[in-house]
């Protein structure tokens, strides 16, 4: 698993990538979580998929700007995150709690 920082629009988002084959699985943590919430899942999933987990803005080691953190903000942020990483293939999204609401 490799950790990276995406810097776009003066917003730094930390993300981790595991695996290199198969479909992409994006993991979105819940309220109060971070990439580390998925640490026990990433290695196992990486055997079959390319796994990307991110620290949502406001959490983990991503930036924490003083803004209104809303579901539309997170949905737009996640969509833009995937576009910047040039992920035009099918992406399966797995979310826990808040991450599930963003995924839905």
Image: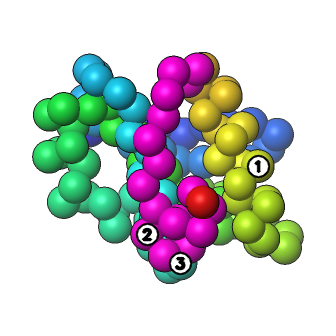
Label 1 packing within 10 angstroms: few (<14), some (14-19), many (20+): few
On-image quarter of the C terminus: bottom right
Give the foreground label among 2 and 3. Answer: 2
Counting residues from the start of the chain, the first of labels 2 and 3 encountered is 3
Pick the front one: 12 or 88: 88
Are the two marked residues, 3 and 1, in contact with CB atoms closer than 8 angstroms? no
- Give left or right: position of 52 versus 89: left
Q: Name the residue tied to disc 3.
A: 31
Label 2 and label 3: CA atoms lie apart by 8 Å
Tell me what residue is drawn at x 77 percent, y 71 percent.
Answer: 69
Quarter residue 34 falls in = bottom left
Label 3 packing within 10 angstroms: few (<14), some (14-19), many (20+): few
Quarter residue 45 falls in = top left
Magenta residues, as a range?
87-103
Counting residues from the start of the chain, the first of labels 3 and 1 encountered is 3
Pick the front one: 93 or 56: 93
Tag of residue 96: 2
Tell me what residue is drawn at x 40 percent, y 32 percent.
Answer: 24
Q: Is residue 92 magenta?
A: yes
Question: Residue 87, relative to residue 61: is it above or below?
Answer: above
Question: Residue 101, relative to residue 25: is it above or below?
Answer: below
């Amino acid at each position: 698993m490799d950790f990276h920082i995406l810097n776009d629009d003066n917003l730094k988002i930390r993300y981790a990538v595991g695996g290199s084959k198969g479909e992409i699985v994006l993991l979105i943590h819940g309220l109060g979580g971070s990439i580390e919430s998925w640490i026990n899942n990433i290695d196992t999933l990486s055997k079959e998929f390319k796994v990307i987990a991110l620290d949502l803005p406001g959490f983990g080691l991503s930036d924490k700007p003083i803004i209104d953190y809303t579901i539309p903000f997170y949905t737009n942020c996640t969509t833009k995150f995937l576009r910047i990483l040039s992920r035009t293939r099918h992406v399966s999204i797995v979310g826990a709690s808040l991450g599930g609401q963003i995924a839905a």
